[in-house]
Amino acid sequence: MFLALYTSCVIICIGLLICLILFQIIKKTPQVILCTECRQCMAVCPLLSRGCNPMEIMLGAKINMLDKTMKNGGYLCVNCKKCRQACPRGLAPFEEAQMWKLRSSWYKQSIKGKKIKAA
Ligand code: SF4
Ligand code: SF4
């Protein structure tokens, strides 16, 4: 009896853990999870001094703070792909930036109002 109860609890816990991991993978792109925050992409981004930080784009996407990161300068990303060339894992922060631009009403409104230039 005790053994059956113990086994059930272990199975439920493992099931919950698997669900949690799958949820994280579905919610974020896998590359976000693979980013080690090594900062090598930062060294090559031509717009770093203006607030576009590829490592922070990845970190923002990982911790659900992408909106803030993008509004702070990430929207300036020009899709030059230099960050991917520098990344030891071949990750592409600009893909997260592009996906955000497609979703963001703030970005679309800003372009319409010409507050910012479309990059
Ligand atoms: S170089 Fe790659 S792994 Fe390193 S912080 Fe940038 S995206 Fe992440
Ligand atoms: S693609 Fe965007 S984030 Fe990557 S280096 Fe170029 S401007 Fe920076």
Image: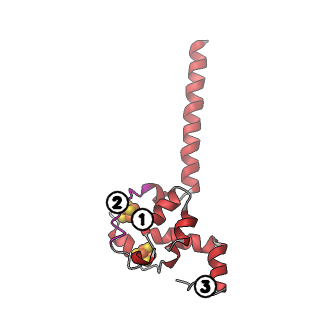
Placement of 51 over or under 10, stated as above or below: below
- Examine the image and state in which quarter residue 34 appears: bottom left
> According to the image, label 2 marks what residue?
38
68 vs 113, left or right, is left
- Examine the image and state in which quarter residue 107 appears: bottom right
Question: Which of 41 and 31 lies nearest the eye of the viewer?
Answer: 41
Q: Is mark 1 within 8 Å of ligand 1?
A: yes
Q: Residues within 10 Å of mark 1 (few under 14, many from 20)?
A: many
Q: CA distance from mark 2 to mark 3?
A: 33 Å
Question: Which of 60 and 25 lies nearest the eye of the viewer?
Answer: 60
Magenta range is: 34-43
Q: Is mark 3 within 8 Å of ligand 2?
A: no
Placement of 1 over or under 30, stated as above or below: above
> According to the image, label 1 marks what residue?
55
Looking at the rendered structure, the kind of residue marked 3 is Lys
**Please, which colouring scheme is shown?**
secondary structure
For marks 1 and 3, the one nearer the N-term is 1
